[in-house]
Image (tube, rainbow, N blue to C red):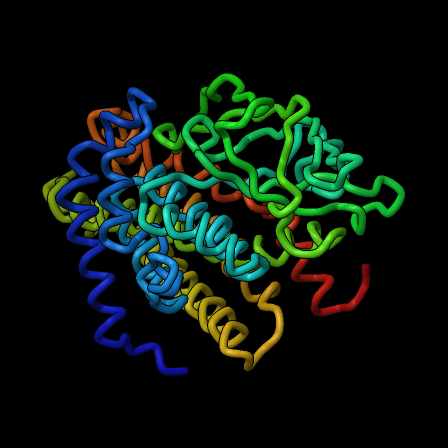
Amino acid sequence: MDFRLSEEQEMIQDAARDFAQSQIVPVAAAFDESGEFPLDNIRQMGELGLMGVEVPQAYGGAGMDGIAYVLAMIEIAKADAAHAVIMSVNNSLFCYGILKNGTETQKQKYVRDIASGKKIGAYLLTEPQSGSDAAAMNTQAKLSKDGSHFVINGKKSWITSGPVAEYGVLFAVTDPDKGARGISAFIVEADRPGYIRGKKEPKLGIRASATCEIEFDNYHCPAENMLGEPGMGFISAMSVLDAGRIGIASQALGIALAAYEASIEYVKERKAFGQPIGAFQMTQTKIADMKTRIEASRLLIYQAAIAKQSQAEGNGGRFTTEAAMAKLFASETAMFVTHQAVQIHGGMGYSREMPIERYFRDAKITEIYEGTSEIQRMVISRSVTGIR
């Protein structure tokens, strides 16, 4: 496999790195402290093409490939994981899902503003009683007698960008008798009556990424806003999550790289017993393990991104297994590396004066959202054994 980057890929990597280091790094700690949504930065990221990396230029995006998206995500996540997850949801879940399943009218109306960063998107799948068991949702969408709209009632939870998103992709039950085959997808607009935002969640990490519950109380969704075919919503959701897992794997790798690079500098400068702590064998073991897991994660992510690109070009099927392996390994690598980084930094790793403790807090969520590590292992095992 040839992983040499093209000129375009290097260009967006450099652009993302320059923006991340100059505009995000200086304010990341303050946003983490306040929990404020970094709207101005997100708008600027949109102008750079980072909010719609793979979106065709015809719909307001950068028109680049899956590797370019991964490279950009890693650079943003190295600076701040909260910025990265906002970017991931816009790219991987909202835009990707509509481009994959939407009509031309839906693409023109909803993708353009999201890909350009003018508006924020959300993905409304999880409910209070259904996390990993996403098909067990209670939110219902009932077609009106005249067929002009659906009346939606229910509650969604843990919605990334929920407090600020103008548009969302929603999954709701349209035929309760058909189980997962009775779930359909819709594009919803937040400024319509019956769309109620709940309180902002007080999170351990990615604190600048606003998260809340969304309640639908007799919300009227135009019938033309159904996304894809009736009853195909759950299948669509799982397919889109494959793309989302590559984004989260990239986020995890960015977090791990930030902690690793900070540790490299620290072990060179910090002295104990008359020599740099990097000279001690136990420290060397930590650094070696960190580096090896990071590079293994990178290769798994690239493999998944290439499989995704092949599908887009009509040369391959679903990339579920590749995405699950990348997400599983990269997220657990992020936790391993940030844990080791805190240990290497000692007391300073535990202090909020340095970003190490923030990397540690941010890493944990990558093992949970868009499919826990346990779910990823189940997906991988089922794909190779055929046993369900």
| Residue sitting at x 49%, y 57% | 96
Q: Nearer the viewer, residue 58 or 245?
A: 58
Question: Residue 93 at x, y = what percent?
Answer: 51, 50
- The spot of residue 79 in percent (x, y) is 25, 43
Q: Nearer the viewer, residue 175 or 91?
A: 175
- Relative to 41, is 202 on the left or the right? right
Q: Quadrant of the N terminus?
A: bottom left
Q: Residue at x 37, y 36 (%)?
A: 360
Q: Determine the residue positioned at 23% across, 53% down.
A: 48
Q: Position of residue 325 (x, y in %)?
A: 55, 61
Toward the viewer: 292 or 190? 190
Q: Is residue 193 visible?
A: yes
Q: Is residue 216 above or below residue 117?
A: above
Residue 112 in picture, x, y percent from top left: 38, 52
* Image quadrant containing the C terminus: bottom right
Quarter of the figure with residue 155: top right
Left or right placement of residue 42 versus residue 179 in this view:
left
Farthest-out residue, front = 146
| Side (left or right) of 72 relative to 216 | left
> Could you say which quadrant of the image residue 102 lies in?
bottom right
Q: In percent of the image, x 10 and y 42: which residue is there?
A: 274
**Is residue 329 in view from this perspective?**
no
The vertical placement of 153 against 4, above or below, is: above
